Image (cartoon, rainbow, N blue to C red):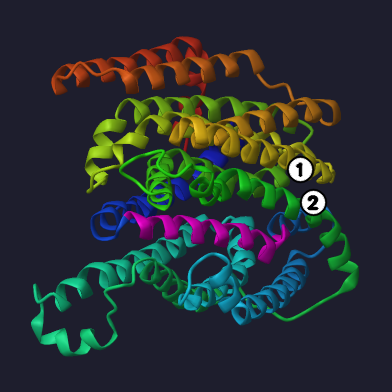
Amino acid sequence: MGLIKKLAGQSAIYGISSILGKSINFLLVPLYTGYLPKEELGSFTMLYAMIAFLNVIFTFGMETSYFRFSTGKGLDPKVVFQNAQSLVAVVGLSLGIILFLFAENLSLLFDYQGKSHLFQWAAMILTIDALMALPFARLRLDGRSLTFALLKLLNIFLNVGFNVLFIVVAYHIVEGDILQILYPFVSQWYNPDWGVDYILLANLLANLLILPFLWKLAGQWEFQLKRTILLPMWKYALPLLFMGLAGVTNDVFSRGLFEYALPDGFYPELTSREAGGVFGATFRLAILMSLIIQAFKYAAEPFFFQQSENKNSPLLFARVMHWFIIFCTFLMVVVAVNLKLIGALFFQADGYTAALPMVPILLMGYLLLGVYYNLSIWFKITDQTRYSFYITLVGAFITVVIILTLVPIWGFIGGALSTLGSYLVMVLLCYFIGQKYYPIPYQTKKDIGYLIIAFLLSYGGFLLDTGSLAINFILHTSIILLYGGLIFLMEKKELYSLLKSLSKK
């Protein structure tokens, strides 16, 4: 129980910082929907899908490889870090330069004529992200979750600040609404035709400012490239690279593909690119679940590696999975039954509510992604990372197939089903193959029961609308209490034991 307490504590720090940071970042949704045309949001969705996809190539699985070779391999973690960071820096800078030089060609290929600077900035963002990946991983491995969290928050504050400055403040200064004394200065650089341009520029500036702080706090880096260390790390990481590419296809790339799969005129009031913007913006309403998953991953990955030599680790992993599912299903129910209220608060223009019915599906999809992260520990600690490639390749294939077949029929719902279907198949494959190579005594039937009941309550609660705010509130709250009561009845003994443990100093 003490180990679960440790994991819960670190997850809480990562989670609080992620939720606080992303809540601040989430305020960009009404800003974007209020100030930018839907077509610009479509461009934003596509470009960030590309960045997410290439980001995997720039880091090529070396974060997980660093965790593995710094624990249980008899190597000096400092030496492993120096070599891994050096290799990532060489690859990241090389790829960044190539992408920067071919920015004009890419702008023509993706139909962004006259916008080659977007791809130049994307190249710089990707390079800086790669240079920060291993230092952030080092903070996680060293258990410095608070330092990690504070740096992430600072980065988000800077990003949001630059977004507000460029998109809101500068706009109103040029329009003569505020601070007219600054008009001569701002009018020299402000471009009213820029939308996604300022989003990328804000991201770039925030990353540039955070990089020196991260390098200083993460510790000294000496350039080293030792073949004896890097070759086995590379062999371990290579399947993870392909896993990451397939995973991004499942999670993010589908958002970029959506606008191309949607037939013209499917939504009469929206062009395909505008619908892609609505799809990407509504995707963000599933952010609370993705935040919890990300926070858990930050804490759990190094934790699992550190506990892998413990003879009781299978029991520990099963227990972690069980409580992870309980917590996340409860969160899913809370968010889903209040989606209409959340949507009304954050969408500041017409045309977004049509996509709301896809959000409960996305919440369930992200929850299954978290289940997959739990399950995937078996191939990481047994050094059989090739299975990660096979599993996620199947998931990526399913994502693309569902996008191409169901989006033309069901639109937004079809896009959401690609996420759910992909992660469901990945979970099933990872579970059955993992139980063969590294058996873990999961509470499978009980956990599946929680997942099914929570999803039914979530979607039912979302659809439940009496037309009265007061009655809706009572009914939605009753659904949340009903599920909470079910958890209490099913886990009464465990809850008492867990609360007693967590209360100990």
Nearer to us in this view, 470 or 442: 470
Residue type at tag 2 = Pro
For the point 22% across and 75% down, the residue is 170
Rendered view: 11 above or below 334: below
Rendered view: 434 above or below 484: below
Nearer to us in this view, 499 or 120: 120
x%, y% of residue 223? 74, 81
Rendered view: 1 above or below 203: above
Specify the label residue 309 is tagged with: none
Could you give the CA–CA distance between mark 1 and mark 2, rounded to whole angstroms?
Answer: 7 Å
> Is 60 in the magenta?
yes
The residue that mark 2 highlights is 239
x%, y% of residue 54? 63, 62
Q: Secondary structure at mark 2?
A: helix
Q: Is residue 229 left or right of residue 461?
A: right
Nearer to us in this view, 454 or 117: 117
**Is the residue marked by circle 1 packed among few (<14), some (14-19), or many (20+) residues within 10 Å?**
many
> Is 408 in the magenta?
no
What residue span does the magenta drawing correspond to?
38-62
The residue that mark 1 highlights is 388
Q: Secondary structure at mark 1?
A: helix
x%, y% of residue 483? 40, 16
* Residue 15 visible in rendering: yes
x%, y% of residue 174? 16, 78
* Residue 369 visible in rendering: no
**Is the Cβ of the residue at disc 1 closer than 8 Å to that at disc 2?**
yes
> Which picture quadrant has residue 228?
bottom right
> Which picture quadrant has residue 91?
bottom right
